[in-house]
Each structure stands twice: as C-alpha cells, then as structure tokens.
Image (spheres, grey):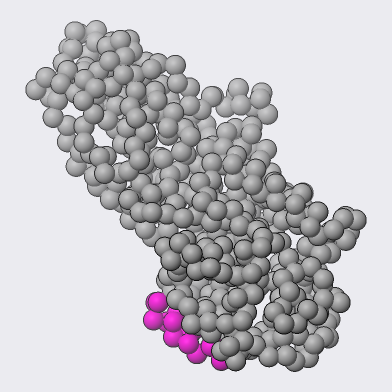
Amino acid sequence: TAIAYPNARPHLGHALEFVQADALARFYRLSGYEVMLTTGTDEHGTKMYKTAKDDGITPKELVDRNVVYFRDMCDLLHISHTLFLRTSDTLLKEGAQKLWARLVEAGDIYKAEYEGLYCSGCENYMAEKDLTDGLCPNHKRAPEALKEENYFFRLSKYIPQVKKHIEAGALKIKGEFRAQEILNMLADLGDISFSRPKSVLPWGVEVPNDPDHVMYVWCDALSNYLTGLDYVNEGKNYETFWPTTINIIGKDIMKFHAVLWPAMLMSARLTLPERLYVHGFVTSEGVKMSKSLGNVADPVEYAKNYGADALRYYLLSQIPTQDDGDFSKDRFLEVYSAHLAHNIGNLVSRVAAMVGKYFEGALTRKAGGEKSIFSYEFFEEEFDMYTKAFEDYDLKRATERVLTLAEYANKFVDDSKPWALAKADETAELAYTLYHLLEVIRIMATMLLPIIPEKAAAIFESLGVEVPDSFNHLFEPVEKYGVKKDAVLFPMIEAQKEAA
C-alpha cells in the first residue's frame, strides 16, 4: 500500500486501501503464492512538522502517538500485513540515503535555487495552472510562496523513458483510463525539488554529505517500497520480493508513483515495479469526506459497532475498485441487512439448523445414495469469474461472484423444500439436498476468505470443516460434515442498532 501520513487518525480512505490490499494478499496466498504485504506510515515532511508545532509537541512525539492508531486499525480490520514500515526507522532512513547516493552517482542530483508555490498538504510544489481560484484543489487552501536553495532531481531526463515504459504497458496501470491521465501530465513536468533546508524543515532524513538539508518527503516516502525490504544490506526480503508486484495507491498521488518513482529507479539502475492499482476516493453522498464538512465516517467506530468484516464487505462490494464510491450509514445498514444478515448469514444458519434437526448434525456424502455424485460445473465457472475479477483488480466484481453463490443456495432451499422432503420421509433425497447445500456453503466460504476472513472462518467452524489454506481442493467433495447449529454470523440489524 501507499504509506499514510500519521498527522491525524486514520480515515475511511485508509481503511479502503488497507482492505483492498489485504484481500489481494489473501487471494494470492490461497492461490499458492508467497506473498509479502507491506503498509506503514510516512512520518516526515512539512505537514508533520507543522502539526506537531501546533500541538506543542515534537514531531517524534506526534508520530509515535498517531502511528498507534494506524497499527490498531490494521489489527481491527484483520489486515494480514507482513511488515509495518515507518520512514523514521533506521533501516528505512539508511536505505533512502543509499538510494540518494545512487542518484548522485548517476549525475541526477544537483543544487539550485527554487522559487514557487508549495502545498504542505500535498507535500508538493504546484504551478498556477494546478490551482482552482488560487487554491489547492485537494486541500482548498492557498499554497505558500517559497524561495530557497534546494537539491533537484533530473526528472526531465527520464520523462521520455517513463513515457515509453507506460505506453508499452511495461507498467500495468489499473484502471486503464488512468494511464492516459498520467501521460497527459508528462509534458508539463520538469526537474523536481528534492530537499529542504534544515533551517526551514529540521524534521526529515538528512541528505548524505550535507547536514544542512533534509530529503524532500517524496524521495524519502517513495523509497519505502524498496528500503523496507532491507535494501541497505540487500538482504533476503530484497532478493525475494523486489521488484514490487503490486502497488496500491489513491488517484491523488498517481504522478509520484507512475512518473517520479519509476524515474528514480531508472536513475538508480533498479528494476521497476510491475503493476500500479489506482483507487478513487470514498465520498459521502457524492462529496469527498472532510472534517470541516462534518461528513467523515470513522472506520474504527463502524468496525467496532457492526464488526470488522461488515465494514470490509461494504468497502469491497460497494466501492468501485478503480473509481470514487459513496459511503453513508443508511446504505451501510442496508447492505449489512440484505447481503450479510439475510443472504449469507441466514443461509448458513437455516441449513445448519436443518442438518442438526434431520441428521443430528452429521451428514456424509454417501447418505444421498445414488444421488451422491455432485456436479461442480456451475461453481467452477463462478470461481473462474471470481479469479479473473481478482486478477483484474476488480474486487467489487469478485465479491459479487460470491454473493451469486449465496443467492443460488437460498433459491435452492426454497425450490427443494427440505422440510417437505423430511415430512414425506424422502431421506436419501433430503440427505442429497442438504449435502448439496453444505458443499455450496463451503465453496462460498472459501471464496469469502479474502473478503471477510473472520466470518468465513466462522462458517467453516459451523460446518465442522477445517479452514483451507489454498484453493487447491475447492472442488473435492467433503466426505462428512459435523455441523454446529449455534452460529449467528451477522446479528439482525435491529440488535445492531441498539448496540450502536
């Protein structure tokens, strides 16, 4: 993932990116890959320094206080990260200095005077044409005029190479329309300021061989993808996991990840990342969430009141993976009730109850007699579409494929009427029908593991089946189920409202 500014508590946009990354990581682990998922915090720069100053504490005290909130949210949302990286860690700082030295060796760092407009919110210099009525379009405030001597990176030298790299599809950008947006930026880009004087900004990674300057935050922050893998010592993680396969970012930082970062790696003669997945913003009734507008939803509050997996499910199923998506409490409760409580949760509880009632919870594949042969063709097709959706980074579509199985199973219950079969003493037909449903639920639960991992594991527990660690045996029939009847996955919404 991109690393977050810990100048305030995490918001729903952070939760979205963390959950998207985690779903992908879990999917690829189940697909048999060795996966490293990194996230973390971007702790230097003007924004952090000013926030700390306003709070009357040191920047180190600020980041140490706020990083806890990001770690806690990762734990709360079941984010299976391998590493949580902090740019203030010694390993990352030394790695950034090593990368800087490589850029110097390439002749791509030089010193010059800079005069321009700087937005501390974006940590970026801006041209007049980038402003809206004189204001930064992202932060709705005027940038400050700066004039100072800085080190510069020769970005202009690498623009033609970056352009060819993108046009050739060597950097695969999802969604595809973002690639053209990035190409449109290239004509206006020149060399970029790469340091700040310590007299202005004392909080940062010191420039090698110049104690009067600290690195510009993007040089420091972007390098986390490399430095967090022990680039300093070129250790095992670096050998195994560089280059990054997938980098997940918000659309507001495309320029830095699709242009500046590849150029830096070209200069340092390092292999470039393979894929850049760009997501949009989480909006509230069509408006970008903002504390000043009072429309910010606290992801921690929702996760604690309704369950982390309920929030994960909403973010993955309702927010278009590559565009803006809306979040409202009413819609959240509607999705919770319709998809989770009534569709998935009710399916598991009603089938478990019938297996308990009619077979005392123990049901074998062979109990259906001649009908014990189960066809997986429909489910294999659904799984293929689910897999393709994940590989296309369309997590919303992947989630929809799982919901299709729940809808299929609920309809199968209504059509087959197991209670009527029991009343008519059609024992073999009843056994086959309920076994069929248990197999659908098992397949559905496996496909839910990347999406709602805690509740998916609870489904396996209610079926009396071990949680799988891969997709390899998805279409191999279970010989015997030992079903528990007491599983309530998603309490009905009325009880949830009272809890809130």
Q: Eyeballing the image, is 5 above or below 382?
A: below
Q: Which residues are magenta?
A: 155-170
- In the picture, which quadrant includes the N terminus? bottom right
Name the residue located 28 percent from the left edge and 22 percent from the top edge. 481
Question: Where in the figure is residue 451, as x and y percent of width and height?
Answer: 45, 43
Question: Where in the figure is residue 161, as x and y percent of width and height?
Answer: 48, 87
Q: Eyeballing the image, is 261 above or below 27?
A: below
Question: Where in the figure is residue 102, as x and y percent of width and height?
Answer: 57, 82
The question of residue 168 being in magenta is answered with yes
Looking at the magenta stretch, what is its main secondary structure? helix
- Towards the viewer: 213 or 467: 213
Name the residue located 11 percent from the left edge and 19 percent from the top edge. 369
Name the residue located 34 percent from the left edge and 30 percent from the top edge. 466
The question of residue 485 being in magenta is answered with no
- Towards the viewer: 91 or 443: 91
- In the picture, which quadrant includes the C terminus? top right
